[in-house]
Image (tube, helix red, strand yellow):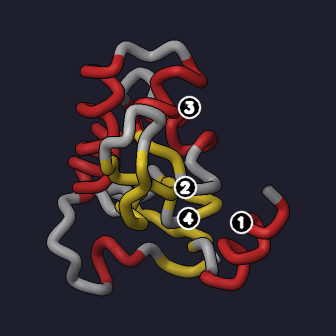
Amino acid sequence: MSTGRWAEQGTGVDERDLLEALGNKYSAKILCAAQSPASAQELSDEMGIPIATCYRRIEELVEAGLLECEGRQLSEEGRRTNVYRRTLDELAVDFSETAPSFSCKERSEAKNRIQDQME
């Protein structure tokens, strides 16, 4: 695992925001389901999450750097919708010091391509 990009790479993401995003109901489910590109509607349908809630969780996860918009696709209704994929495979939070520290194992582009080919 490598040190998280939040503090060291200057993304501007507040670590408190990261913890809040992870602490919200459905966030972990969305991250697990987003190993391959999925729209908010697909995630909502797959997990039984109300669509408005799904959009809010997605926004929080994107702001925290845990999910990213990977592009757009046509929905079954013919509308262009954003598709999202998680940016990492593992995240660890260490609470042993005075402030939490994070380490992560980010998803590689190669892993994304292999995942896409398997589907």
**Amino acid type, mark 2:** Pro
- Asked which secondary structure carries label 4, the reply is strand
Q: Is residue 111 above or below residue 21?
A: below
CA gap, disc 2 and disc 3: 14 Å
Task: Provide the residue designation for mark 1.
Answer: 116
Task: Provide the residue designation for mark 4.
Answer: 88
The first of marks 1 and 3 along the sequence is: 3
Q: Residues within 10 Å of mark 3 (few under 14, many from 20)?
A: few
* 54 horizontally vs 92: left or right: left
Q: Residues within 10 Å of mark 4 (few under 14, many from 20)?
A: some
Counting from the top left corner in percent of width and height, residue 109 is at 61, 82
| Residue 36 in which image quadrant | bottom right
The first of marks 2 and 1 along the sequence is: 2
The residue lying at 42 percent from left, 30 percent from top is 41
CA gap, disc 3 and disc 4: 14 Å
* 47 horizontally vs 77: left or right: right
**Quadrant of the image for the N terminus?**
bottom right
In front: label 1 or label 3: 1
The first of marks 2 and 3 along the sequence is: 3
Task: Provide the residue designation for mark 2.
Answer: 37
Q: Is residue 59 above or below residue 88?
A: above
The first of marks 3 and 4 along the sequence is: 3
- Asked which secondary structure carries label 1, the reply is helix
Task: Provide the residue designation for mark 3.
Answer: 29
**Amino acid type, mark 3:** Lys
Label pair 3/4, CB-CB below 8 angstroms: no
**Quadrant of the image for the C terminus?**
bottom right
The residue lying at 24 percent from left, 44 percent from top is 59
